[in-house]
Image: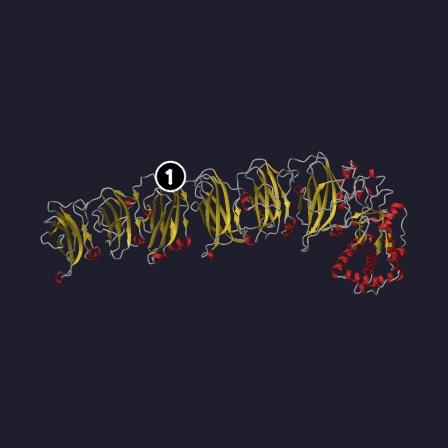
């Protein structure tokens, strides 16, 4: 009887597959289903795959059901429970070290070189050390049977020369067990005979089973399955323990051979091996020794694939059919369903079947058709579906390997088997599968469940997309963060796309609420052509850096591309309340609601791709909504709303950043999410203000208008209100665009002034130049120092058209001191016309007597202040309104300024910018000492029609002034000439018809410079006079 052993493995690849000789069978043509594993010898003259390798029609129908045959192999029900108990017991002994005790004892007695009569007693006597602690009975008999198996497998070498001699001469070698024991070598019958002898001497009931074994395809491509006259006969044993028979094969447990030598490699797998596993390679002549509940027919046995010892030991299940045939009318896809331990990855290679090769090349690194192979983990984790897309008609060899991913040692692949695939069908234009990187996929329990594209019976085989969108469903550890994007072109794991090639806005990853490990990846494609869908592991703490790829899937988009996009989520703990793709109409406000687990501070920007400035803050806004329970009440989340307006059509990117509320002192913000939108129409002249919320809350400031704010071309108006009773000071800063032709100081283009309603302020601006203007509003409480003033609002206005109004109107510059003075400028005078011909006139509402002084000065000479060119006085038509007037001695740009009580204690309050076209030469206003005017409760009244100054009349000159003076105040009036001499008789004081209103007349005696001086006192007898008014004139 002959025997086949495993082939010697190659470097890094463990290949232990049963092979036999290469003798051809005369009845090979009758054999249709055959093993194709390791066809390492072929006929060089044959250049095509033999036609008799293709299954005939009868077996073809049978082979479609051979997986059912494989799964239906069940051992005898009689003794099944005891057999399962024995298998469990052997596993426990192996883990606990009992089998190692047997090995140590057997190795020790072997060194003493015992005789045949001694060896059985030494191996199986009840006093042997390895039986200590083992319950006497069937368990001790099991260990005794195993000890004999171990001794024979470790001490008897397979005699390759005897086997080759038998084939060449036809003379069977000597297999007498006593001679085998003495020579320490034999063929399979010698192993079986020696086991029968030694086990019998130990009191065990043993039988020899004669039969045949399966081998690889032979030299001529002929079947090597059992047939009369074929040299694949074999012998093994069965031992009875209790009432149950157990199968064993010492030959298979001894080692492996190649064509000329034997390599010792002990394997305990073939001791007490289960019948359903041994039948895959051993065919007993008597079918009763199949020990199967349903006896297997020879025809079914022929179609079963040969299972290697490695696959048996690992518990790998594979399709039973060894030859896969795809007709010309079928889809050219071979599907193999495998079952492996969960921590094992499956590696599959595909190459054309080469019958001229002199040896079989086991090569797990063959990537010739790697894109045509897809291995998908099923939901239970230990089942895998292998999809093999045949690239063209012809014959192909498919090799199956497994890798233990739980091992941290050097990577070692174990070869399991090969399949022969014969394909007559033409492939479609494009076939491709997702590429799953199994080492990474195993570490995160990644399992691809389904993907959509072209459909065939619910499965997608063709990597083409005609709808512009795809969906993939997979499972992975719920605490794993993946980066997902698409990239143009085709990539492999070694050719990862660069950052610039990552399109994150076209993929969306969502999780199932009930099963967080279940993920759905929705993908849209913006253009036709090749695209690669990428899933990659993210670094710790959701960093942007990518680590290892998990899956790459190249898709050919041949139909309509999609115009929608998805949010790019860049931080964990974010929920976006939107389903499907995003779209922005542009002629309305774009809204998006999102939730986070904690309260945060946000800021957002809009980035354009047009000729405009690349980054804008004013077109986005984030507002907090109510706090609410989500996810069926499992956690409290905080909800916010993002609002966006688009200044012009085009492609826009919206970026949202965040930081925690407990880190407000930090200026570092992190990415939260981004949007990419294609806008067809715009929402012009609309902005969102930037609000410093901590400061606005502290000061009770808010914008009364509804967000967003709209403006009309170059005119911007809004209102700001405060809820506090404290007085606030404000300051406006205005940053114009970089326009070299703009000559007006920008601070006069905007102003914040009190309205008629308390606590409400009007903010207005006229922006005469195109470009981006920034209006900043700062504020503080009056009692705080001005240095503590902080910006509250920022308005960034994009002006696309020049001002509609001519630039003859400006706003007064109101300094912080203005807001604490209870002053107010009437709405009719804001804005004011700044280009004047002769005189500047405006008004001020003040509820009490003002204590202001006024000066004018040229813009180019701010230190040369003229106090006699401006005046503030009561309006005769309004009790709380005052008139501000100014005249100018020459053309040019002038500043009119109101300041505090003392010119030495300079504190600006209001400032006007004017452009003088026709100056009033040699005209001045009286200078009034406001402090003394208020002390004496005096008022100044212009004469005539209120147009001051009046011209000095006559050749010598005449002038009249009007004042209001209480009864208890005495007036001293004087005239001083240009020589600084007081001249009597020039002035006189007349009481008018109005109570306490006096008129001061002057009749100058000579031309030249004169000064009219008014002094006031309540105690003139003490000579306590205060200068309250001085009017300098030139008499003609």
Q: How is the image coloured?
A: secondary structure
Q: Can the viewer see residue 824? A: no
Image position of 823 (left or right of 942) = right
Residue 36, x across and y down, in percent: 77, 43
Residue at 90% x, 54% y is 176
* Secondary structure of residue under mark 1: loop
Q: Is residue 492 above or below residue 933?
A: above
Q: Residue at x 40, y 54 (%)?
A: 695
- Of residues 562 and 449, the one nearer the viewer is 562
Question: Could you tell me residue 730's position as x and y percent?
Answer: 34, 52
Residue nearer the viewer, 859 or 837: 859
Q: Is residue 302 left or right of residue 366?
A: right
Number of marks drawn:
1
Q: Quadrant of residue 391?
A: top right
Q: Is residue 596 above or below residue 835?
A: below
Residue 75, position in %: x, y? 79, 50
> Looking at this view, is 841 or 630 the one in front?
841
- According to the image, label 1 marks what residue? 801
Residue 153 % position (x, y): 82, 56
Q: Is residue 465 visible?
A: yes
Identity of the residue drawn at 79% across and 44% down: 216
In the picture, measured across the screen, residue 717 lies left or right of residue 6, that is: left
Q: Quadrant of residue 141?
A: bottom right
């Amino acid at each position: 009887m002959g025997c086949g052993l495993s082939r010697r493995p190659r470097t890094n690849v463990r290949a232990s597959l049963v092979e036999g000789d290469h003798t051809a069978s005369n009845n090979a043509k009758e054999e249709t289903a055959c093993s194709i594993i390791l066809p390492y010898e072929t006929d060089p003259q044959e250049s095509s795959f033999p036609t008799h390798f293709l299954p005939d029609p009868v077996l073809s129908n049978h082979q479609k059901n051979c997986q059912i045959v494989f799964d239906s192999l069940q051992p005898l029900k009689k003794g099944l429970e005891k057999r399962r108990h024995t298998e469990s017991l052997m596993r426990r002994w192996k883990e606990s070290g009992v089998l190692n005790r047997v090995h140590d004892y057997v190795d020790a007695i072997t060194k003493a070189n015992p005789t045949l009569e001694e060896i059985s007693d030494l191996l199986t006597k009840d006093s042997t050390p390895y039986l200590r602690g083992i319950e006497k009975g069937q368990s001790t008999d099991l260990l005794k049977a195993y000890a004999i198996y171990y001794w024979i497998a470790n001490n008897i070498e397979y005699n390759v020369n005897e086997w080759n001699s038998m084939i060449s001469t036809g003379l069977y070698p000597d297999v007498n067990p006593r001679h085998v024991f003495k020579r320490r070598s034999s063929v399979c019958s010698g192993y079986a005979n020696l086991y029968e002898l030694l086990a019998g001497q130990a009191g065990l009931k043993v039988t020899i089973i004669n039969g045949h074994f399966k081998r690889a395809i032979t030299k001529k491509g002929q079947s090597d399955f059992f047939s009369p006259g074929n040299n694949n006969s074999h012998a093994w044993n069965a031992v009875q323990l209790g009432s149950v028979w157990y199968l064993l094969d010492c030959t298979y447990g001894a080692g492996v051979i190649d064509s000329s030598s034997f390599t010792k490699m002990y394997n305990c797998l073939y001791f007490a091996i289960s019948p359903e596993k041994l039948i895959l390679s051993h065919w007993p002549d008597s079918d009763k020794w199949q020990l199967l509940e349903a006896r297997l027919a020879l025809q079914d046995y022929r179609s079963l694939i040969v299972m290697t010892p490695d696959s048996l030991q690992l518990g790998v299940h594979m399709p039973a059919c060894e030859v896969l045939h795809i007709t010309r009318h079928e889809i050219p896809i071979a599907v193999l369903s495998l079952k492996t331990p969960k921590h094992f990855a499956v590696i599959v290679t595909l190459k054309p079947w080469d019958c001229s090769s002199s040896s079989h090349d086991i090569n797990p690194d063959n990537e010739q058709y790697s894109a045509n192979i897809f291995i998908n983990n099923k939901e239970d984790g230990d089942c895998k579906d292998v999809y093999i897309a045949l690239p063209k008609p012809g014959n192909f060899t498919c090799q199956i390997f497994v890798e233990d991913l739980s091992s941290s040692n050097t990577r070692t692949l174990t070869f399991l088997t090969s399949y022969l695939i014969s394909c007559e069908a033409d492939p479609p234009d494009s076939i491709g599968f997702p590429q799953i990187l199994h080492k990474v996929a195993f570490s995160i329990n990644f399992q691809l469940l389904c993907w959509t594209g072209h459909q065939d019976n619910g499965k997608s085989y063709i990597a083409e997309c005609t709808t512009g969108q795809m969906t993939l469903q997979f499972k992975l550890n719920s605490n794993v963060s993946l980066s997902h994007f698409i990239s143009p072109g085709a990539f492999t794991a070694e050719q990862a796309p660069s950052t610039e090639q990552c399109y994150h806005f076209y993929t969306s990853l969502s999780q199932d609420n009930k099963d967080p490990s279940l993920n759905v990846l929705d993908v849209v494609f913006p253009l036709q052509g090749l695209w690669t869908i990428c899933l990659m592991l993210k670094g710790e703490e959701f960093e942007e850096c990518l680590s290892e790829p998990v899956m790459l899937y190249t898709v050919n988009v041949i139909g309509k591309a999609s115009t929608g996009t998805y949010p790019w989520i860049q931080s964990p703990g974010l929920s976006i309340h939107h389903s499907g793709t995003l779209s922005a109409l542009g002629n309305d406000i774009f809204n998006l609601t999102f939730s986070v687990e904690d309260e945060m501070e946000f800021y957002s920007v809009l980035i354009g791709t047009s000729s405009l400035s690349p980054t804008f803050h004013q077109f986005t806004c984030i507002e907090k909504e109510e706090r609410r329970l989500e996810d069926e009440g499992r956690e409290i989340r905080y909800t916010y709303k993002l609002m966006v307006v688009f200044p012009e059509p085009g492609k826009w990117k919206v970026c949202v950043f965040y930081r925690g509320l407990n880190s407000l002192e930090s200026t570092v913000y992190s990415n939260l999410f981004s949007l990419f939108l294609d806008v067809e129409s715009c929402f012009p002249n609309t902005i969102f203000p930037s609000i410093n919320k901590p400061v606005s809350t502290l000061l009770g400031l808010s914008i009364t208008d509804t967000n967003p704010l709209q403006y009309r071309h170059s005119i911007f108006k809004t209102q700001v209100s405060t809820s506090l009773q404290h007085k606030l000071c404000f300051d406006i800063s205005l940053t114009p665009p970089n326009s070299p032709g703009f000559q007006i100081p920008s601070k006069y283009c905007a102003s914040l002034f009190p309205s008629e309603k308390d606590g409400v302020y009007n903010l207005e601006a006229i922006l005469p130049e195109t470009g981006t203007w920034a209006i900043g509003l700062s504020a503080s409480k009056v009692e705080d120092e001005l240095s503590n003033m902080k910006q509250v609002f920022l308005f960034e206005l994009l002006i696309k058209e020049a001002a509609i109004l001519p630039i003859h109107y400006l706003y007064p510059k109101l300094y912080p001191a203005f807001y604490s003075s209870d002053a107010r400028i009437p709405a009719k005078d804001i804005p004011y016309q700044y280009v004047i011909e002769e005189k500047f006139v405006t008004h001020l509402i003040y509820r009490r007597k003002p204590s202001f002084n006024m000066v004018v000065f040229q813009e180019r000479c701010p230190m040369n202040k003229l106090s006699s060119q401006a005046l503030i006085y009561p309006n005769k038509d309004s009790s709380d309104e005052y008139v501000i007037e100014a005249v100018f001695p020459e053309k040019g740009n002038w500043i009119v300024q109101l300041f505090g009580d003392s010119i030495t204690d300079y504190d600006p309050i209001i400032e006007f910018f004017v452009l003088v076209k026709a100056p009033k030469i040699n005209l001045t206003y009286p200078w009034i000492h406001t402090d003394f005017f208020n002390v004496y409760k005096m008022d100044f009244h212009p004469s005539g029609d209120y147009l001051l100054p009046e011209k000095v009349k006559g050749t010598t000159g005449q002038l009249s002034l009007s004042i209001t003076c209480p009864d208890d105040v005495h007036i001293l009036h004087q005239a001083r000439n240009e020589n600084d001499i007081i001249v009597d008789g020039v002035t006189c004081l007349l009481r008018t018809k109005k109570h306490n209103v006096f008129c001061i007349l002057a009749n100058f005696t000579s031309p030249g410079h004169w000064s009219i001086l008014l002094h006031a006192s309540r105690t003139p007898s003490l000579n306590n006079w205060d200068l309250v008014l001085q009017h300098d004139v030139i008499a003609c």
